[in-house]
Amino acid sequence: MGATSVLKARPAPPSSPSGNPVAKKRAGRVPTGPGRRRQRAGMMMVAPALLHASLWIGLPVVASVVLAFTKYDVLTAPRFVGLDNFRDMMGDAVFRKSIVNTVVYTFFTVPFGMMLGLLVALALHTGLKARGVFRTAVFLPQVTATVAIALVWLWIYNPGNGLLNTLLSFLGIDGPAWLSSTSWAMPSVILVGIWQGIGMKMLIYLAALQNLPKELYEAASVDGASKVRQFFSITLPLLKPATFFVLITSMITAFQSFDQIYILTDGGPANSTTMMTYEIYKSAFREFRVGYACAQSLVLFVLLMGFTLVNRRIMGGTRGHN
């Protein structure tokens, strides 16, 4: 029998482990020897983080979901009330106002902060002089305590002797009471949010820009593409994963804004700057309606999850350059 007939008589190997019992058994075999030791070492390394997340994140989340369906005031035992907390929320005009304020605050701080962060990152990436000093100055508000930043802006917005109204007086303009006016309080808070968040967005975009392949830009220059065309045809598409990450983290930060609201306006005037987190704080720690506060927190979580899924669908995934 020739070699050709032998090869024809030999059965073809299975295309997948599922069609071969031996391969399937090998695929499901528990690692032994060095592989098992490495697996055990890896589990031991992540065990502290898993334990920490389970105790301080997992359990509170489960407890919040359970308490959302109860009436609980800390002093007495929780009492199951079903959907009463959510019905109360539907009739709570202040909480509905806080949802609108949170969406408005997020709508302005996130896109404007992302655009400014990208512009600053592009300026640093293209060889701006004194880049180290400039990068530190832009990033400094990100690592500064929000309370300290709010106190500085509280002085800037002071209607009597604040920096902003003092500068406007040199131009012959009488500045308003920025934080005491229902017309100017929200724009003033939004400005603080944009200014404080530029640093982190700049850092993420700068790291992404430094990893873009230079060969594409060289090829585009040879083909005669302008810098503007290169930006929209090469830079922006390749920054898609970084943009998605910045968008989601910025939205979460905006929805969780609390410190600057507490210091600058205390939710006023006339609830014009109250946010969802601030209303949750008031319900839990001022009114001791812990069950109601947990229900509000659950609504906040659902909104964040919904916005995240919508953004992911709009951006068509996060696959970028590999």
Image (spheres, rainbow, N blue to C red):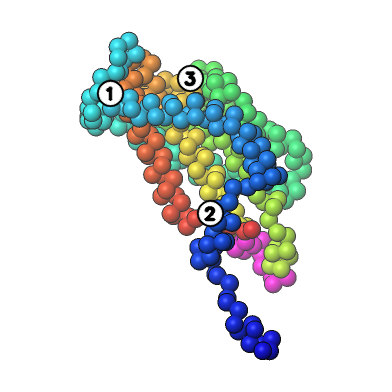
Q: Position of residue 151 (x, y in %)?
A: 55, 19
Q: Which amino acid does label 2 sit on?
A: Thr
In the displayed structure image, the side of residue 14 where residue 281 appears, left or right:
left
Q: In this view, does 227 lie to the left or right of 98?
A: right
Residue 318, disc = 2
Q: Give the range drawn in magenta.
A: 222-234
Under mark 1, the amino acid is Thr
Rendering coords of residue 138 (x, y %): 65, 35
Quarter holding residue 17: bottom right
Residue 213 visible within the image: yes
Give the label on residue 263, or none.
3
**Res. 191 visible in picture:** no
Write down the residue under mark 1.
70
Q: Which mark is residue 119?
A: none
Q: Which of 90 and 317 is in front in this view?
A: 317
Would residue 173 be counted in the magenta stretch?
no
Binning the other alpha carbons within 10 Å of mark 1 as few (below 14), some (14 to 19) or many (20 upward) gives many
